[in-house]
Image: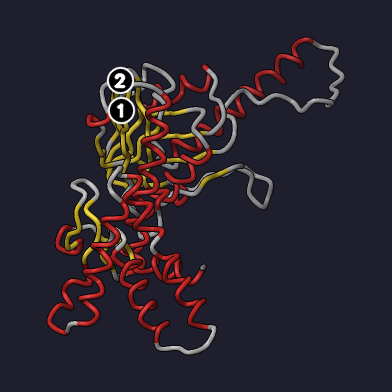
Amino acid sequence: SSSNDIGNIQGINILKAHGKSARDSYLLKGYALNTGRAAQGMPLRVAPARIACLDFNLQKAKMQMGVQVLVTDPRELEKIRQREADMTKERIQKLLQAGANVILTTKGIDDMALKYFVEAGAIAVRRVRKEDLRHVAKATGASAVSTFADMEGEETFDASLLGHADEVVEERIADDDVIMIKGTKTSSAVSLILRGANDYMLDEMDRALHDAICVVKRTLESNTVVAGGGAVEAALSVYLENLATTLGSREQLAIAEFAEALLIIPKVLAVNAAKDATDLVAKLRAYHHTAQTKADKKHLSSMGLDLINGTVRNNLEAGVIEPAMSKVKLVLTH
């Protein structure tokens, strides 16, 4: 991930597909849209892709409600109908002339309009979620367009509004067709395909995954890490208890209480893992006391809880780490 992508969690698209088990979830390089091509006659793949992102209907233009036209001759009425159809055709031709071969719209595309895309060998996708359209536009360098009208009142579409990607393909994931946008130009877009037995399972996985991704984001932003598993809280608690004994005023009580409160975190961690919390926290404090009082035992300051085996271990070596930023915020908010 480049430094520009740090914090851009939205660039990770999460798709949920029923079936298989959670362990069958996988990562796809590219942005996946949870929908297929608008018509079967369209190609399954276009490369390189030039993508138009639209936020309006590509359906036969209808006169606005309330517009009254007094027509006595049926042929005149037919001309109006023909003009309505021609307006949509002209819009599509403008898109195709600008070089677009992938058209994404948040609204509808009617059968008459689809015919033109099929003939041009372009992929059109309708009813794309606005959120997805925004992310695709950002990843491909496209501009989301809500109208073709320019300052002069003419309808135009410029090639500079198109986004670029190496390829756009329709693939089958589980029982659904998805449109994959691969090799996006401005930022790397990836999709996570989650598999699970039912909606509840998938939603729970989605939440857990989002939390995990946020931790990675925080770590990259923080640039510094500390030992996890209650190590920081235990070390702070021991340090503050020692500090409290050096004070002769009422401050001693407040600091001692704060030191005690910090131990709630390792205690809760142990209880949640169904381990003997009292025993583990006592051992943890003993290690940190030694680390802070004996010069040759400073390495013990990385000791934290191993919640799988119910022991105390060096969490830096075990790879159980947390962003330092989170710990600083935790203490400051208290």
Asked if marks 2 and 1 touch (Cβ < 8 Å), the reply is yes
Instruction: Give the x, y percent position of residue 259.
Output: 42, 71
Q: Residue at x 18, y 78 (%)?
A: 298
As rendered, which of 146 and 118 lies closer to the eye?
146
Color encoding of the figure: secondary structure
Q: Which residue is mark 1?
A: 195
Relative to 63, residue 41 above or below: above
Instruction: Give the x, y percent position of residue 118.
Output: 40, 22
Q: Is residue 9 visible?
A: yes
Q: Which residue is mark 2?
A: 19
Label 2 element class: loop
As rendered, which of 182 and 54 lies closer to the eye?
182
Amino acid type, callout 2: Gly
**Label 1 crowd bin: few (<14), some (14–19), many (20+), radius 10 Å:** many
Left or right: residue 230 compared with residue 162: left
The residue sitting at the left extreme is 296
As rendered, which of 151 and 286 lies closer to the eye?
286
Amino acid type, callout 1: Arg
Instruction: Give the x, y percent position of residue 148.
Output: 59, 42
Relative to 85, residue 10 above or below: below
Q: Residue at x 28, y 65 (%)?
A: 231
**Label 2 crowd bin: few (<14), some (14–19), many (20+), radius 10 Å:** some
Q: Residue at x 38, y 53 (%)?
A: 214
